[in-house]
């Protein structure tokens, strides 16, 4: 059985790159009838907060990436790490080191000035020092040979031991370091497979040495290429939102976000739309490309539009409601709100943008799109003309309205935008609305006439 884990450090809200790591771990566990675990790596007590932890766990639940056991927290497991450190000391696989920060600093500077990679020189390695104040515990890393492991994404990876120095396992205050905790937990939690970002690749040979010292069985690895911005650097706030919350606030569906993240650097024929169950069937972590994957917002918008389009009207409305509330829209204030939403549901690609597009249907027109006015409304004569024609109509439905508009258009020899846009602007403030007969029919005759009057007055002033 395979056991995977997502091991976030709660030093920030859930990042979009973290979502991808969690997703791939989740999928791999489910594909192998295994378990997906969550471990909160909160050993950095200064930067970790409970609020960030809550944000990460809440968002994973929202995405449907539910763990198969309650999450564990490293800050509550110190005893396990100290026990492991003791074992390493007892078996002579580690040693205490009393080198001062000043000595280490000057060593680093000397190495750097010679163009060498900074590394501990092993001064205390054979001194058999006892534990004591100010002393760190280091792992005795083999000086020769190499570490080889197979990476599911990158193939065979080889690291020379001569490149690795003696890693610190316990800090001078005897608290365990990230590497020790990470390795001990993977063992204690029965993890078989580590799927994480490529930024951890250089940690892996070091962690394998700790596993070896503790006599743990080896793990399977997949190091995922990073999610990049357009400038091919790690995705950052410069490029676009990086926090999952921001995407949810904008009205991207969790299913669409997962779909987009799975398609970053992976494909299956020309299929674009994948739900979590499809990914469990079709996705292969081994097929993820090695190169960094560029985050594409246009693609996400398109995918989100596709996922939204698949909802029944009532489901769509349930998803839309919170965004309506946030945008001061009381859907139920209009009896025909289902018709309005059905007509407008593909006006934009995100729920928040759709709610904003709906605003004028439920509220007064707050302002007019001035550019559109300049372009389409030269004077009020056409508006007055149309207003009279609309007033004369004895029934008010899409068909009758379309027929009347077509007649006016051909009598006056106008193009479709010339006749439609002024009315659209009057009704909604902008040119964004469905076909004109339909748009008009979504309002009552009185409302439509009032709105046309309001625009005429505005233009007259
Ligand atoms: N806590 C690490 C991070 O947030 C993950 C370590 C791992 O997955 O092994 O980057």
Image (cartoon, rainbow, N blue to C red):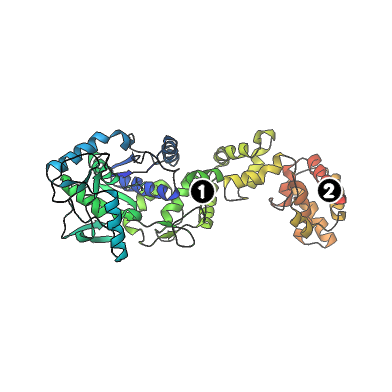
Q: Residue 147 placed where, x, y %?
A: 20, 57
Sequence-wise, the earlier of marks 2 and 1 is 1
- What is the number of the mark on residue 307? 1
Q: Nearer the viewer, residue 84 or 310?
A: 84
Q: Residue at x 73, y 47 (%)?
A: 428
Q: From the viewer's perspective, is 191 left or right of 427? A: left
Q: Are marks 2 and 1 in contact (CB under 8 Å)?
A: no
Any atom of ligand 1 within 8 Å of the CB at mark 1? no
Q: Residue 24 placed where, x, y %?
A: 36, 49
Any atom of ligand 1 within 8 Å of the CB at mark 2? no
Q: Is residue 165 above or below residue 243?
A: below
- What is the number of the mark on residue 23? none
**Callout 2: few (<14), some (14-19), or many (20+) C-alpha neighbours within 10 Å?**
few
Q: Is residue 62 above or below residue 399?
A: above
Q: Residue 214 placed where, x, y %?
A: 17, 44
**How far apart, in angstroms, are the residues tagged by discs 2 and 1?**
40 Å
Q: Residue at x 62, y 46 (%)?
A: 354
- Asked whether residue 106 appears in the rendered view, the answer is yes
Q: Residue at x 28, y 64 (%)?
A: 116
> What SS does tag 1 mark?
helix
Q: Nearer the viewer, residue 306 or 120?
A: 120
> What SS does tag 2 mark?
helix
Q: Nearer the viewer, residue 331 or 139?
A: 139
Q: Residue at x 33, y 51 (%)?
A: 196
Image quarter in which the N terminus is found: top left
- Asked whether residue 420 appears in the rendered view, the answer is no
Q: From the viewer's perspective, is 61 left or right of 114? A: right
Q: Which residue is mark 2?
A: 458
Residue furthest toward the bottom?
114
């Amino acid at each position: 059985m395979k056991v995977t884990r997502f091991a976030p450090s709660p030093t920030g809200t859930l990042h979009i790159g973290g979502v991808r790591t969690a997703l791939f771990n989740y999928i791999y566990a489910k594909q192998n009838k295994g378990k997906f675990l969550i471990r909160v790596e909160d050993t950095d007590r200064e930067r970790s907060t409970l609020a960030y932890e809550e944000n990460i766990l809440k968002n994973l639940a929202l995405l449907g990436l539910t763990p198969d056991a309650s999450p564990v927290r490293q800050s509550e497991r110190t005893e396990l790490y100290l026990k492991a450190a003791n074992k390493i000391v007892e078996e002579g696989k580690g040693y205490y080191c009393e080198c001062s920060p000043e000595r280490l600093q000057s060593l680093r500077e000397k190495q750097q000035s010679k163009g060498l990679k900074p590394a501990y020189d092993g001064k205390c390695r054979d001194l058999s020092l006892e534990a004591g104040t100010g002393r760190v515990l280091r792992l005795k890393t083999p000086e020769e040979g190499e570490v080889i492991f197979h990476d599911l994404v990158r193939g065979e990876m080889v690291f020379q031991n001569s490149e690795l120095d003696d890693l610190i396992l316990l800090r001078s205050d005897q608290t365990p370091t990230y590497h020790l905790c990470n390795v001990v937990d993977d063992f204690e939690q029965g993890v078989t497979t580590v799927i994480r970002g490529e930024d951890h690749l250089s940690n892996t040979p070091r962690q394998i040495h700790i596993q070896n010292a503790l006599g743990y069985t080896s793990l399977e690895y997949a190091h995922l290429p990073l999610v990049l911005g357009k400038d091919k650097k790690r995705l950052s706030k410069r490029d676009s939102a990086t926090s999952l919350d921001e995407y949810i606030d904008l009205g991207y569906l969790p299913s669409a976000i997962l779909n987009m993240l799975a398609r970053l650097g992976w494909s299956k024929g020309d299929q674009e739309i994948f739900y979590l169950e499809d990914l469990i069937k079709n996705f292969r972590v081994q097929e993820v490309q090695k190169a960094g994957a560029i985050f594409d917002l246009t693609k996400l918008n398109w995918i989100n539009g596709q996922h939204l389009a698949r909802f029944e009207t009532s489901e769509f409305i349930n998803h839309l409601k919170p965004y309506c509330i946030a945008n001061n829209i009381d859907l139920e204030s209009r009896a025909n709100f289902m018709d309005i939403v059905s007509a407008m549901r593909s006006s934009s690609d995100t729920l928040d943008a759709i709610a904003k597009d709906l605003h004028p249907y439920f509220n007064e027109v707050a302002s007019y799109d001035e550019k559109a006015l300049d372009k389409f409304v030269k004077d009020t004569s056409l508006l007055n003309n149309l207003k009279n024609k609309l007033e004369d109509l004895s029934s008010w439905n899409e068909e009758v309205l379309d027929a009347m508009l077509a007649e006016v258009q051909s009598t006056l020899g106008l193009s479709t935008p010339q006749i439609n846009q002024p009315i659209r602007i009057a009704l909604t403030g902008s040119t964004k609305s469905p076909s004109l007969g339909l748009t008009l029919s979504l309002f009552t005759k009185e409302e439509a006439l009032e709105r046309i009057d309001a625009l005429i007055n505005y233009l007259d002033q």
